[in-house]
Image (spheres, rainbow, N blue to C red):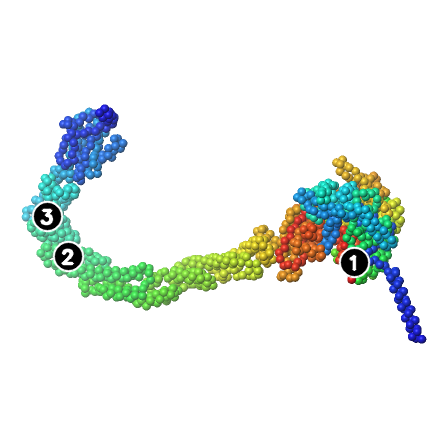
Amino acid sequence: MQKKNIFIIGGIVLGVALLVLILWLVLRKDLSDQIAIPYISHQKPVIDPHLPHAVDLSDKLDEVLFDGLFNISANPSGIIYEDGLGEFIGIDANNVVSVRLNTKKKWHSSFNVQVKKDDVTITPAQDRYFSAEDLRFTLRRIRDLGSLSPDYILVSQALQSWDFEGPDANGEIRFQFKSDRIWTDADIMEVLSFKIIPANSDLNVLNFYNGSGPYLALTPLAETSNYYRSPAGSATISRVNLKPYIDNSTYTTEFKNNNFNVLLSTPFGSLSPILENPEKYFYKSNISTTFFALLFNTQRLSQAQRKEARKLFNNRAIVERFYKVNTQQQRHITDYKGNSDNYSDYLNRSVFPSSTYYVEEEIVAPPPQDTSSPDLSLLPDTLRIVGCLNYGHREEYADLLEILNDPALTGGRVRALAVANDAIKRGDYDALLIAIDGYRSTFLFDLYNIFLREPDLETYKINLATQMDAKGASVAAPQSFQANNNFCRLDAARGGPEQEATLKFLEYMYGFMHTNHIGDKQVYAQYVDQVEQELALGAWLFSLPSLAYFRTQFEAASIDLYGVASQLSTIEKWRERVE
Amino acid sequence: MKLSVALLAILIFLSSCSPYKQLKPKPEIFSREGEYIQLLNKDKRFKLKKGKKYYMMFPGTQAENTYLVLRGNDLPLLTSHLTEQFTKGKGDIPVNDESAADDNVNVYKIGQVAPTYFWVVEEVRQNLELTLDYRYVPIWRYRFETRSAEFQLTLARNKVDRGNYEALGSTLRAQDLRFDEELADTRRKNQTLKSLQGELQKIEAIFPPEIKNSDDKAYLDYVGLKNELESELRFQENYQVMLNAFNKASASSSDGDAFALAAPDLMAFFERKNEYAENVVQEARQNIGARLPELAPYLEKVLQQKTDISPVDYPLDKAEALFRECNQQPDARFTAAAGAIRTFNRDAEAVANARSGLDDIKASLEGSGEWPSDNFYPRLQSQIDKLAASLPRVSATTYGKFSAYRCVTRLDQAARAAGEEMRSLQLGFQTAAALVPQINRLKAQSNYSEIIRLLKMNPGLDFLTRQYGNIDQLSLQQQESDINIALENQLWSVAESKIRALYEDRNFLDYDAALPRKNQAVKNAEERLVSTVEEESRKRINAFIEANKAVFQKVDSLYANPAFSPVHELTFSSGGVSVLEANKKRIQNYLDSFRYDQFPKMSIENLYREFERNPGDNGVAKARAIVTHGKYYKGTDRKIRNLVAECDPQAAKWITKPTEYRKIYVLPVNANSQASNEYVFKLNIQIESDAQFPVFDVNIKLPREVASRAGQEQWYERITMNGNVLKNEGRFTITSPTPDNDYECQLTPVQMVKNRDNILEVRFKHSAFKVLEVSVMCQRPIIKKN
């Protein structure tokens, strides 16, 4: 009897184990040979290789889909430039740069893509090769975008004209570079690293999918956020899949659960206690690309009120609360320099975040935060601060709104609310809590993204209007500032004592964004900072650390994150770890 | 024929044009001795016109001492001269006319000098027919003939009347004669005749040899005149002696002293007594003999009045001879006085001789300045013994009644004093004779200090001390010599101790006199010691530098070499501690100039040249040697400091110009070669910029061997800017060196601090242990997207 029972029990156990095995085999999340990255489902990345976007994943995907004549990559010693659609021939004594076009490179449209569930079949279609016309087309687009495109600055500082000679019989084209410096190979290839789109591209579309990069988009045959290794490319891993999520609150759990294997930014930019196992995860940090600010509504708060309102927000106290410093729940951070819990390094005192070149090198020297008590008599009884949790950074927004409501920090004069996007569009706030994503700490810091963005978090639009001045130079038109086309509700047509300063601010901002001379940028940065300090357009709270987690599925050494370049710049070199 | 006529005409014409017309006497002029010959032109006299000029040629003569004599009454109407060279008015040199005051005679001395003489008439005051005689005549003859009568007359007029002489003693008494007048007259005549004798002797001097003993009338006349003159002069000489004797005797008739003093004159007469007539001699004996008793009182008086010890200067022999000539015996009084004088003179001479000998000895002590030989004093001992023996004894018995006379007593005192002095010298010489050999032995040893000590131990021997008057100087010289020898042999301590000993030396015969010289000697020796030490130190350091300027191993130890210290550490100066320290400091400063300037400078230049020529040849060691030298270099040569900086990995290399590649040597900083060596280079970017916030790209071209694996592993260990780490993260970009970009690494954007040092430091590791070269270029950056 006992023996029988033993057999029965053993059979049950074996059966359960078999069942578990079967379930595991069926239900396990197999992320092999793919790069899975989460994104906010209602904030689909917008892929335009020549324009920045508020959804920072957008710009990162440029590297996935597109090539430049030269592509930026990296190795352990730093960045390198690799031949993309061009092969660098050389530069002569007259600064004529010769590039042989890689006209054997196919556009992604040269392939047919078939998707059946998870199976992707790519077959050749009509070959569409890269040509000089594609390059010329791209150059003209960049020229037309002007200061809206960082590539405009990049190219305009180097080329004598927005064109080139050739190609000749060898397929070589020649750019006439300006003669005001020695053009090193690195400089030349940096200038010519702008992404190239086909000449037949429809410029009226929001997204550009036809590129020549390492991955081709499966759109529209599959999810818009899925990409497959281009047969013409050299990527190691077959697929790049973007995984949709409602918000970022579950990112770390989902990552732990292996629902994706690359987390490009953690909530709060902090280390996650649940991802501590180095056998399974590793992380890499780089420079901040997001900062939080309170943008004041200039329609509802006077200049004097904004100045007093600034005093309400002690960003150091806010950050410490934000990261629960000195509590058991403290959110720990680390940076690419090897510092830990260096929260104060992320405090901002200017529209230019502390991580940017302009502050770090003291080009602008914002005054220390005014710690004096605000003149409450000048302020409204309640300062209405709003934030929208639906467009990313839900976790951070929620915590910050709670912190701002704390009378201990803001004296009971603040009412911070989570609101819908419509409230923001209407301008129903005294101040808007907003996360500015994808900012660059280089010379190319983007002011348009802060002050000229359409006040609608659902769309991304820069409301820059330009005109010619009496000398024929391009200047910003006053209509760039209209009360309903920017978060600060600035209106250049509004009379009053702030108008002159507002126009100056517009002039300086455009000057900063449009110039391709570093010296001019430095001076304009000072002017912008000074006028902004005077106008008190916002309270510049802090930047968010940038921390990416990877599963150890990947070979850590194959993933180079460097500087301000996109985290996905070297994606084609990522490879899986070989056990 | 026609030609001859033409030539003659020309000659005549030219002749007529000459301002001087030649007078050609017929018969021709002969230069033969003879009487006067009239100059005629074919028996006619020459016609001379007023205002014209003429000349006439006279042949020379072979005979010496010949006159050409021209005589004529027309001579006063002419201005003429005789010349050896006729220049026709351009400046003849006329022969002197020796004629006396006779205007009608011209006398010219001619001879063998010229074959022809020209008598030139420069002026004819009126027209005349020339009356002129000429004569060639020996000079003696012309002179004697022209003055013979004059000579005869002079002799006749100056002969002494011999009447008184002949009458003296017979018809004429001496006292009746005015000897003084007669003597004066005789002397005057005698002078005149001696002059005449002189004239005759001049003529005789130019006698031609053949004339002597000839029967030439003029010659015979001359001899007769001469003999007569000599006879008269001989008489006058004797006559004067006689007159002088008689005059002295007469003049001292009442003065015995004068008579005694006239004894020599009186004896002069008697010594010629054979020349006089007997009557004269007798008269003299009578007059003089009567007065001989006056001699003795004179002698006594001389002795009595004499106060010195010189011999009495009186011719006693003459006085005694007077007695004999006057046929008298000297009286006893005379004999006693004369004897005393003779004794006195003998003793005085003996004392004088002794004194002279003593003086000679003393002079020999002062001598030549040479130090005495061993036998010097024994010889002097012998001499002084002899002198002492020759010294007379002046006793009362010898001088009798004259012994108390002052001259005698003084002579006695002088003799005694000389004796005492001699005895003192004898004792001194005895000591000196014993000392001198010792001194000479010490001298051979150059032991002057001991000699001085010996001399100072015998303080009484002044004569000996004086002989060694140069002993102090010799002692100084010897010490100086010893110092110099020590210096020449580079025995610095010995030299310095001898200088110190010299400075402290007080062992001198005359210390006060020697002190300035000694001080000067010390000063000179000190200066030489210092300068020699300095010079030898300089030679040593120069040799050291030359030998070691190319050394690149253990460079630090080079600076510990004694060559950088003086060859001798000075410990003494007569000037005291301050001077000593100043000297030491000066030398050390001089050497320090090598240690801290010249040596490192030369070595750095030399090593850098070698280093740059081939960095692969011990380049690291050479560079480190340059850096080590640079540690010591305190000079101000910016070039040197730059060279050191080029080799010093810890020194930032200045980048001052944009867009220019600058070569930099990169060196390992670990001590020795390892599997992985650490390299460092630093840049100080100081590029002028108008920008308030200058920012640059830094482009570094790396050696292939360093950057070839940059794709596999980070080629650098660390890059910092002003101490801040630059990473290829954040907003900063570091491009990787690749074969495609010729291994050029770019750092951008590198922010500079305006007007301050901007130190970029790069550290990397490399397997090779060698000198690497990188090129660095900075320029303003471009705006980059990535």
Reading the image, the residue beneath label 1 is A576
- Contact, CB < 8 Å: mark 3 with mark 1? no
Chain label for disc 1: A
Q: Is residue A500 left or right of residue B435?
A: right
In space, the residues marked 1 and 2 are separated at their CA atoms by: 164 Å
- Contact, CB < 8 Å: mark 2 with mark 3? no
Q: Nearer the viewer, mark 1 or mark 2?
A: 1
- The dot on residue B175 is 3
- The dot on residue B317 is 2
Q: Confirm whether residue B98 shows in the render.
A: no
Q: Is residue B323 left or right of residue A54?
A: left
Tell me the amino acid under the disc marked 3: Gln
Tell me the amino acid under the disc marked 1: Glu
Furthest residue in direction right, as rendered: A1
Q: Nearer the viewer, mark 2 or mark 3?
A: 2
Of pointers 2 and 3, the one earlier in the residue sequence: 3
Q: Residue at x 78, y 41 (%)?
A: A144
Q: Is residue A116 left or right of residue A94?
A: right
Q: Is residue A268 above or below residue A127?
A: below
Q: Nearer the viewer, mark 3 or mark 1?
A: 1
Q: Quadrant of the N terminus of chain A?
A: bottom right
Asked if badges 3 and 1 are on one and the same chain, I answer: no
Tell me the amino acid under the disc marked 2: Asp
Q: Residue at x 68, y 43 (%)?
A: A95
Helix, strand or loop at disc 1? loop
